Amino acid sequence: MMRTSEISINETAMQVSVAVPESKKLDCFGQNKKMDLMQKLEILTDAAKYDVSCSSSGVGRRGDGTGIGNTSAAGICHSFSSDGRCISLLKILFTNECIYDCKYCINRRSNDVPRASFTPDEICELTIQFYRRNYIEGLFLSSGIIHTPTYTMELIYEAIYKLRTLHRFQGYIHVKAIPGADPLLIQKIGLLADRMSVNLELPTAEGLQKLAPNKHRKNILAPMRQIQQGITQNKEEIVVYKHASSFVPAGQSTQMIVGATPESDYHLMMVAENLYKKFDLKRVYYSAFVNVNEDKELPALPGGPPLLREHRLYQADWLLRFYGFEANELLSEEKPNFNVLLDPKADWALRHLELFPVEINRADYQTILRVPGIGVKSAQRIVRARRNGNLTFEDLKKIGVVLKRALYFITCGGRMMYPTKIEEDYITRNLISVKEKLPFDRDGMTYKQLSLFDDTSVYDWKKAVGS
């Protein structure tokens, strides 16, 4: 097997070529000759707004002084739009042209929408100019499919290669791998990007066949497996070969659409759990289905996008990743969906009252983690603090425990905070009466992505990219 470090990132010529007629190659960009860079930017930032998997957490790499940019280990997604999407990355599509006709996608082939395509040099220009003016800290690059997956990945590779080598850009880069593209291209991009992701799109092969007939589950899982194996192999190489190139150091992620097909929360959680175990994913993103197309195969959603359901899935996903829960503990075939009125942890605790109350001064760390109102940091602080003596409720409050939820499930020194009935209906009523902070604004979450043009004039942004 070829080592990842044996594929040089200093190659100036592509080793993979695709038989695309020269006239079609010219059409790819020639149709946009009359469109200036800012018009393309407006179209292709808007076209990228439904892709939520743009977190950059998990990699730390300082610039070496020979180029510009660096990546913060804490993640560079410092600011978010009202719907929680990251805005510190330049988040764009390479093109919104697409040969596929996915029923849920605004950029599908059959839609009559404004089309645009960047060139690799334009991607570089935008990234460097926006970065120099402190508007962004990195790049999130996805794309529709031009001609073939491999041809599209060739263009993306050219852009990323030039950014890293010609422009010496050392900031964060997240690239979407396109299923069906040549594996060598995915390998080469993996040596340049910090994170890669392959969108699972829908949780089942049946749903994919129904709503995205041009996509196949096998083609989606193949690059996910390749990236996972490449990361594992690269870690071993770095131990042996100290100067081996890093391969996707921030790991890979994926995204599932929630509500476009009838799968239950239980099914979604089981799929996510399997992805974490089998592909070592850093993150599974959940995207509430937004009906942007008229199609009989799509659900009507009279109540709008299932945003609260998406929120509960993210909370449950957090429990899988950091709290030691398993999917079949949170849900089952008999109880396939989360209670939208309660967070999944509280819902689980109410169904297992036989385990409570927990004595905070004696319970082990994993047991404390399962108490509603106690997070990972609070649990760690509790374990450290009680070495110096028994903790009181006042101590827990200072530590950061949310006592308005935790008080029904814990004791300190054998006593509860208040006289409380360990009874499901009683505790449920009290928990629901405590208003939960939800990630929606007062008027409800909107799906308008925070635009690069929202806070300043178009003139200023044109000036920023030198137009």
Image (spheres, rainbow, N blue to C red):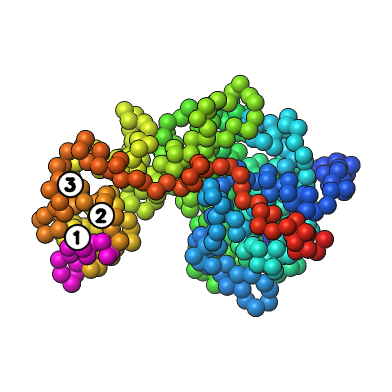
Q: Nearer the viewer, mark 3 or mark 2?
A: 2
Q: Nearer the viewer, residue 454 or 13?
A: 454
Q: Earlier in the sequence, mark 2 or mark 1?
A: 1
Q: Can residue 204 be seen by looking at this rendering? A: no
The alpha-carbon separation of the residues under discs 1 and 3 comes to 17 Å
The x and y percentages for residue 352 are 22, 40
Q: What residue type is disc 2 on?
A: Leu
User: Can residue 458 be found in the magenta stretch?
Assistant: no
The disc at residue 403 is 2
Magenta-highlighted stretch: main secondary structure? helix
Q: Amino acid at mark 3?
A: Phe
Crowding at dot 2, Cα within 10 Å, few <14 / some 14-19 / many 20+, comes out as some
Taking the spot 82% from the left edge, 61% from the top edge, the residue there is 467
SS of the residue at dot 3? Answer: loop
Residue 443 visible in the shown view: yes
Residue that appears at 56% across and 38% down:
201
Instruction: Please state which of residues 430 and 408 is positioned toward the viewer in this rendering.
Output: 430
Magenta segment: 386-399
